[in-house]
Amino acid sequence: MSSAEPGGISSSIQTERLLLRCPCVEDVPQVNSAIRESLESLRPWMEWAQSPPSLESTRKRIDEAINTYPEKSDIVLLAFLRESGEFVVRLGLHRINADVPSYAIG
């Protein structure tokens, strides 16, 4: 089940196990903690994951995701386990080109 928005892209999607939704500032502590716990695994693949992020830098990235969502220029969703509410992954559609249409998945 999803809540559709103009442009056909949902702000939330629910599956049997997951809730995928747009980020909000209340997510900052949980996202920051997950990044810190996963830093060694992220480091080889993510340029931004070379050192532990501060809460302020995580908030900045969340704010950017919130601000780019309405214009659909960069779409970031956070996934949480429905049963526990535990944050499990940040995913996104990046470098969106409506003319082709194409985007990168991250």
Image (tube, rainbow, N blue to C red):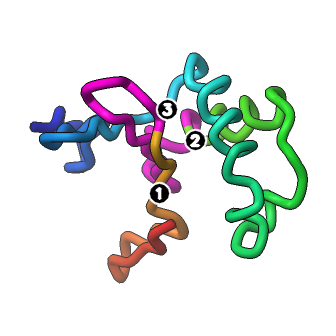
**Pointers 2 and 3 in contact (C-beta within 8 Å):** yes
**Residue 97 at x, y = what percent?**
44, 73
**Residue 93 at x, y = what percent?**
45, 62
Q: In this view, does 54 lie above or below 85?
A: below
Res. 17 image quadrant: top left
**Residue 65 at x, y = what percent?**
58, 41
Q: Name the residue under label 1.
A: 92
Q: In this view, does 20 lie to the left or right of 52?
A: left
Which amino acid lies under the numbered mark 2 shown in the image of this protein?
Ala
Nearer to us of marks 2 and 3 is: 3
Q: Mark 2 points at which residue?
A: 65
Q: How many labels does the image show?
A: 3
Q: Write the start and end of the magenta stretch as one range.
A: 66-87
Front-most of residues 63 and 58: 58
**Pointers 2 and 1 in contact (C-beta within 8 Å):** yes
Q: In which quarter of the image is the N terminus?
A: top left
Which amino acid lies under the numbered mark 1 shown in the image of this protein?
Gly
Front-most of residues 46 and 66: 46
CA–CA distance between discs 3 and 1?
11 Å
Q: The residue tagged with tag 3: helix, strand or loop?
A: loop
Q: Does the magenta stretch include residue 74?
A: yes
Q: Which residue is the extreme one toward the top? A: 26
Q: The residue tagged with tag 1: helix, strand or loop?
A: strand
Which amino acid lies under the numbered mark 3 shown in the image of this protein?
Pro
Callout 2 environment at 10 Å: few (<14), some (14 to 19), or many (20+)? Answer: many
Q: Mark 3 points at which residue?
A: 23
Q: Residue 103 carries which label?
A: none
**Residue 106 at x, y = what percent?**
51, 66
CA–CA distance between discs 2 and 3?
7 Å
Q: Which of marks 2 and 1 is nearer the N terminus?
A: 2
